[in-house]
Each structure stands twice: as C-alpha cells, then as structure tokens.
Image (tube, helix red, strand yellow):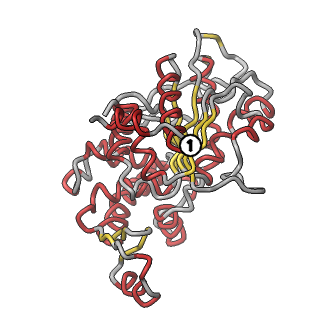
Amino acid sequence: MKITEFMQRHYRHFNAATVVDAAKAYNDLLESGGKMFMTLAGAMSTAELGLSLAEMIRQNKVHAICCTGANLEEDIFNLVAHTHYRRVPHYRDLTPADEQKLLDGHLNRVTDTCIPEEEAMRKIEHKVLDYWMAADARGQRYFPHEFMYKLIRDGVLVEDYEIDPVDSWLVAASEKNLPIFVPGWEDSTLGNIFAAHVIAGDVKNVHTVRTGIEYMIELARWYTWTTQRKKVREEADSIADIENLPDVPDPLSMEAVEEGPGSPVGFFQIGGGIAGDFPICVVPMIHQDLRLECPVWAYFCQISDSTTSYGSYSGAIPNEKITWGKLAIDTPKFVIESDATIVAPLIFAHLLGW
C-alpha cells in the first residue's frame, strides 16, 4: 500500500484527518495555478527534512522558503559532514557531565543528534569566509542564502559531500534558484562566525551580508510580483551580478505596468518563531503601510506542538490572523498539533503521490 493510500484509509478523524485535509487543500491550490510559500523553524534540516522537501522543490510544489539561519546552514552542514554526526537516542537520560563530554568532543547536541563542530561548522566557515572577504573587498553585498548558493554552484563543496546531494533541500533550491528569505540570520552559527570575523577585522564592512529589513523588502517585491505580476524599474541596490539569479523587477514602484494575472500564494508553516512570524506579515505591511492593493494569503497550514494559548503567536488560532489582515474569512485554514518531523514528510509524500 502506498503512503498516500494508507493515509486516506486510516487518517479519517481528529488530528489525522486534518493532515489529509491540509494535503488535499495544498494540492487544490497548486492545481488551480497557485504557489506555495513554506517556512522552516526548529531544526528541520538536522532532522533531514531534505529527504522529502528536496523532491517537493524539484517537482515545483514549493515556490519560496523562509527559514531560520540554523535551517539554512544545517542542511549544508549535513551535506558535508553526515558521517561525523552522532545520534544519542538516550538523550533524555544525559547528565550535565554527559553533556560536558559531548562539548569536550566538539559535538553540539540538537535533541538526539550531535552536529560535529570541526567537520561541519568549521569546514563551512573556511569555505564561506573566502566569499565573505572577496565580496567585502569588492564592496559587494549579498544575502546569506546567496553565499550558500554560490558555494554549491561553484562546486567548492563537491569533494566533501557525504550524502547524495539529491537529498539536500538547499541543493535542490539552488538548482531551481528558489527565493529564500532568512530573517534573524545573525541568530545562527554562521551569523555568529561572521560577527567574529568582523570584530577580528577579516571582514571590514558588517553590511557585506544583507539581513532582515532588506529581506522584508525583497519579500514584498516577490509577493507583489507573484500575486499581481507588475513589471517596474529595477531596485537600485541590485544583486543581479550573482550568477543565474533572475532579474525580478521591483513591483512596489508606482511606475508599475500590469503584465497579466498573478497567482494566489499559500502559506505552509512548519513550527513557529521568526520563520513564520516574519514572512506572514508582508501582506498587511504592503496593504496597510504601503497603501497598495494586495491579496491575502490564499491558504494557511501550521504544523506545531504549540497548543492554543494566551498571548503566544505560535499558539494563536488561524482566525486571529484575520484581524491582522493576513488571512480572509474563506481562506482554507489548518492547524496540525503534532511533531513536524513526523507530519511534514507524510504531507509531502501525499503530495508527491508516494
């Protein structure tokens, strides 16, 4: 029995039924010509979500991603250091002394998985530092994901691959030139490392790596372009000199000229935090702050173990987002209260027909 068939036979009620309903509505959006925006919080890359997400990207079932800096880097860490990772299935039994031993062994624990500092973090640091310094010397500025794309496209990591690159979602994204948005990148290992190299003087300009506010501006351009197809002047601070990046015009200029219908965009949120909070706000920002016409998100699904609570954004029910101008009364809305490492691959399998 295929995974999809199993789900349709056994996932009939309660939380399980929501999983199937959300997958079907996701597919309905795509079949109607819509696009899907996906957010990755937590440690989904270390959980190796790329095993299913990479194929979702290749089959054009994901059209943009917003992720934490950790998820951006941890997919590439796994790509080059997989055999050096250590799994600790008894992590709940670890004592403080046990944790200290892991630290002494340069192993940083994420639940039951330890990321090797030297083989993963330092290996990528040595590679990307050359790109940071080169851009800095030329007075160029790029986003965090663009530096990762360059590492992959230039082939400087190929000899270090320890998994099949077909299982890396970042490799798939680079091949598709998928738009990626990484709010709060400075709250990541590579973000900390970049700050250290600025302090040390290896990188002179802290703005060599573009971050938060500029990502929101790019997201506003992407969302308006995707949903309304407006062609306008190019942004002054262009990133067009990066290889293979599309020349996406700035749709927020008042010089906009209509170029046909756009596509509705759905919002598929894995976890909570900044990866979800940051991008969903682009709709009310465009509409309320820029005073421009803007459709709300056409679909919403969140997989989270954050139960409905008072004052918690991650625990807020979708209807609350109506009051903020993010969703409409008739937007398909789903909340799956479960472990995303279990549920997300199942939904992806359903969409991929596995």
Position of 76 relative to 318 (above/below): below
Report the residue at 62% width, 49% height from top: 212
Q: Quadrant of residue 74?
A: bottom left
Instruction: Please say whether residue 1 is visible from this viewpoint.
Output: yes
**In which quadrant of the rendered image does the C terminus lie?**
top left
Check disc 1 and report its element: helix, strand or loop.
helix
Instruction: Please say whether residue 141 is visible from this viewpoint.
Output: no
**In which quadrant of the rendered image does the N terminus lie?**
top left
Query: How many discs appear?
Result: 1
Q: Position of residue 23 (x, y in %)?
A: 48, 33
Position of 152 relative to 47 (above/below): above
Residue closer to the observer: 169 or 202: 169
207 horizontally vs 116: left or right: right
Report the residue at 42% width, 48% height from top: 147
60 horizontally vs 311: left or right: left
List the residue tagged with mark 1. Answer: 14
- The residue lying furthest to the bottom in this view is 97
Report the residue at 71% width, 34% height from top: 326
Q: Position of residue 277 (x, y in %)?
A: 65, 47
Q: Amino acid at mark 1?
A: Phe
- The residue lying furthest to the left in this view is 159
Q: Position of residue 267 (x, y in %)?
A: 58, 35
Report the residue at 35% width, 61% height from top: 124
